[in-house]
Amino acid sequence: MRALLALVSVLVLAGCSTSFGGIHQVPLPGGADLGDHPYRVVAHFGDVLDLVPQAGVKVNDVAVGRVDRVELAEDNTTAVVTMLVNGDVALPANAGAELRQSSLLGEKFVALYEPPEPTGSLVDGAVIPLDRTNRNPEIEEVLGALSLLLNGGGVGQLQNIVTEVSAALEGNEPELRAALSTIDTVVGVLDSEKGNIVAAIDALDRLSSNLAAQTADIEVALTQLEPGLRVLTEQRNSLVTMLGALENLSTVAVDTINRSRDDLVADLTLLAPTVEKLAEAGADLPNSLQFLVTYPFTDYFLNAVEGDFVNVDVTFDLDLSVVLENLRNTKGPLLPIPGTIPGEQGPSAGEAPLLPVPTLPAPIADGGLAGLLGALLGGGR
């Protein structure tokens, strides 16, 4: 009887294997409802760990599909996971996929998620590339890393570190409290000046942008600055001598000002009335200067100027009586007497003068030009 039951069981299992194409194709109880029109989504993972077909596909921890196939890509670089998703589930075209675990020791499943900026719609045959897929670390990996830290890391040295820190702080509690109080004050001041600090950082960013935009000009300036620095280096001694002389000059100037301070103050005090009178003159002084410069032609005279010429009628009044009056009032001779010029020898004794010196006649009665000429040529009338 037992042999018969075993034979029936083997036949049933063989039939199941033949009918469904493998144990992975057997639908699990309690799986997601795919609906009447599910669509396929293909995702590329760098590592799927122990993900198997028939594993769940979830959105926001809600089962919406299952894994249909897990296979290696043709280039042997990624794992290709084909999923069946319920047709009523709407996802954006740029959706991502993550490989998660239901619990520490639970099963693996694929979680589909929406990005911060969703676009389009996920359709049948859509492919999620490798840059939009990842996986969470497994508990085995976490425990392995923790084991490496505890066994081969520096945890054993923590006791020494704590001991040394305690020894360094022992007896320095007041200083430590003062330092912490100072740090708290500094942090408070920095927090109160947060707006100014942000503004300074923004200004520095703008300055950096301007400097970056003028990199070529700065490079040219630095390149052309080198010859000037070389000349300054060559003239260093002369510059030092000049600065020394300038220092001496400033010393003498300061001493001179100190010595002449009283006289300068007195001169300024004496000059004050003159300046006050000039201030009282007001606009009369510049007007007088303007008239003095343009005398005898006033500003109105410029109205007669047309282009680069001017027509002027001038009448000269020559009164010879005034000229004669001036000649009569003079003390010396009209012409120089020979021998009176320095360096010249006069005529010897018995020699007549080379040119008779006329004498001024008596006042000419008629005041005419003929009488004047006759008096000059004939020595009188």
Image (cartoon, helix red, strand yellow):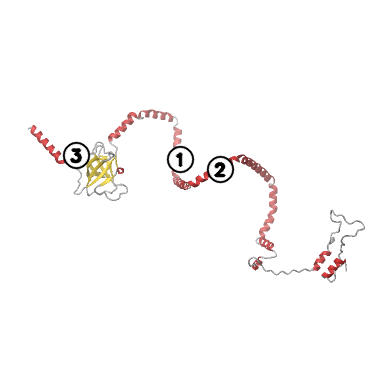
Task: State which mark lies toward you, 2 or 1.
Answer: 2
Q: What amino acid type is highlighted by mark number 3?
A: His
Q: Position of residue 64 (x, y in %)?
A: 23, 45
Is residue 363 among what the camera can see? no
How busy is the neighbourhood of tag 3: few (under 14 within 10 Å), some, or many (20 plus)?
Answer: some
Q: Which residue is mark 2?
A: 227
So how many labels did they put on this image?
3
Q: What amino acid type is highlighted by mark number 1?
A: Val
Of callouts 3 and 1, which one flags the residue occurring earlier in the amino acid sequence?
3
Q: Which residue is mark 3?
A: 24
Task: State which mark lies toward you, 3 or 1.
Answer: 3
Query: Residue farthest to the left?
Result: 1
Of callouts 2 and 3, which one flags the residue occurring earlier in the amino acid sequence?
3
Q: Secondary structure at mark 3?
A: helix
Q: Secondary structure at mark 1?
A: helix
Q: Please state if 246 lies on the left or on the right of 181 as rendered.
A: right
- Residue drawn at 82 percent across, 66 percent down: 325
> Looking at the rendered structure, which numbered label has been put on residue 157?
none
Q: Which residue is mark 1?
A: 186
Is residue 278 among what the camera can see? yes
The quadrant in which residue 49 appears is top left
Please determine whether, in this image, residue 66 is positioned above or below residue 320: above
Q: CB of mark 2 within 8 Å of CB of mark 1?
A: no
Of callouts 2 and 1, which one flags the residue occurring earlier in the amino acid sequence?
1
- Residue drawn at 52 percent across, 44 percent down: 223
How busy is the neighbourhood of tag 1: few (under 14 within 10 Å), some, or many (20 plus)?
Answer: few
Q: What amino acid type is highlighted by mark number 2?
A: Pro
Closest to the observer, 220 or 43: 220
Closest to the observer, 297 or 226: 226
Q: Secondary structure at mark 2?
A: helix
Task: State which mark lies toward you, 2 or 3.
Answer: 2
Q: Spatial distance from mark 2 to mark 1, Cα to Cα?
A: 47 Å
